Amino acid sequence: MKVIFAGTPDFARVALQALLDAGFSVPLVLTQPDRPAGRGMKLQASPVKQLAQAHGIAVAQPRSLRTDGKYPEDAADAQAVITATQADVMVVAAYGLILPQWVLDAPRLGCLNIHASLLPRWRGAAPIHRAIEAGDAQTGITIMQMDAGLDTGGMLLREAMDILPQDTTATLHDRLAVQGGRLIVQALNQLAAGTLVPEPQPADGVTYAHKIEKAESTVDWSLSAEAIDRRIRAFDPFPGGSTSVQGEVIKLWSCKIDSAPRPVDALCGQILSVNADAVSVACGQGVLAVTALQRAGGKRLGAADFVRGFGLQPGMVLGVHMAPGGAGA
């Protein structure tokens, strides 16, 4: 079976490696154009491009696939190379470009997508982040037959995975990437055998995982400790949780629910105690123990090392000053 692969980040790289390890023929890879990255902001190839080049696979990097869009010349070039490949199927994983109908129709067996949620829950750009933020007990991988809608195609394979209490987007991402690689190999084998049957997505339970914005990183201390904990874990590695103290914005990277009772007269965001393990902060409901923090331009540090360099003290108030016992979530 001849497979075109379309993907960009590390999540997609894991899937491409699984296809290669399983012996599938991958004559062409589509990935996003090189982007500036690192301190020197030098152009850097995507993880998928790096893997493709290491295996001598042809790579195309169109800025758009729409022949009537902003870069029609890119789309025309991509159309020519995709058509010439005469692929049986295209596998798509976190590619980053919308596929127009001509792409969906190009492979003989259409396009299969590796989506990191149990569809129809969390269609869209950030399913891993939103599942953690919402407090879902489970997520998983759905292999889907792509259509013109936003993650609306028929489900081919669907497998659940538990979200662990301390999972971050980074840790859950890595497990889901491996699961996705395994399931897409299974799906292609079943496709070749003619035993893969799409199941329409149910109309009930549809939610959308909207793209993560930097502005969401600011911690609202009037929320419950549980809600803030979920958001900080959901936003690791991007954009991280953030709050302000003494005019400086600091990042919050890890935390846990503190079992200590919340003083009824404490302000939301007020530091209650500082020790070698954590900085404990009053929330709208409950207390959050922040265990890893970062100053602008600095490194992530455990609470003890951070406090030695910054001097956080009980009584200080983080973020916007709120009245005692604000609304929880």
Image (spheres, rainbow, N blue to C red):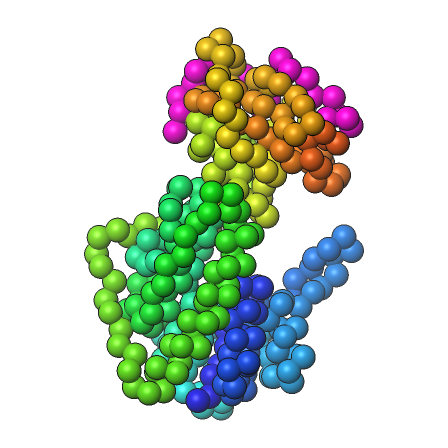
x, y (%) of residue 145?
Answer: 33, 72
* Quadrant showing the N terminus: bottom left
Q: Main secondary structure of the magenta part?
A: loop
**Residue 58 vertical placement versus 297 (above, below):** below
Task: Examine the image and state in which quarter residue 160 appears.
Answer: bottom left
Quadrant assignment, res 254: top right
Q: Position of residue 51 (x, y in %)?
A: 63, 75
In the displayed orientation, state which residue is furthest to the left.
Answer: 203
- Mark yes or no: residue 175 visible: yes
Side (left or right) of 301 relative to 19: right
Q: Is residue 215 magenta?
A: no
Place of residue 284 in the rendered image (x, y in percent of width and height, measured from the top left): 45, 21
- Considering depth in this image, is 259 or 57 the residue closer to the camera? 259
Q: Is residue 312 magenta?
A: yes
Q: Position of residue 45 (x, y in %)?
A: 66, 68
Question: In the rendered image of this protein, does residue 110 appear above or below residue 173?
Answer: below
For the point 78% across and 28% down, the residue is 309
Identify the residue at image location x=49%, y=91%. 84
Task: Write down the region rendered in magenta.
Answer: 307-329
Q: Residue at x 63, y 67 (%)?
A: 46
Task: Tell me: residue 275, above or below residue 40.
Answer: above
For the point 58% across and 64% down, the residue is 10
Q: Along the horizontal axis of the image, is 223 left or right of 157?
A: right
Q: Nearer the viewer, residue 195 or 50?
A: 195
Residue closest to the eye, 300 or 99? 300
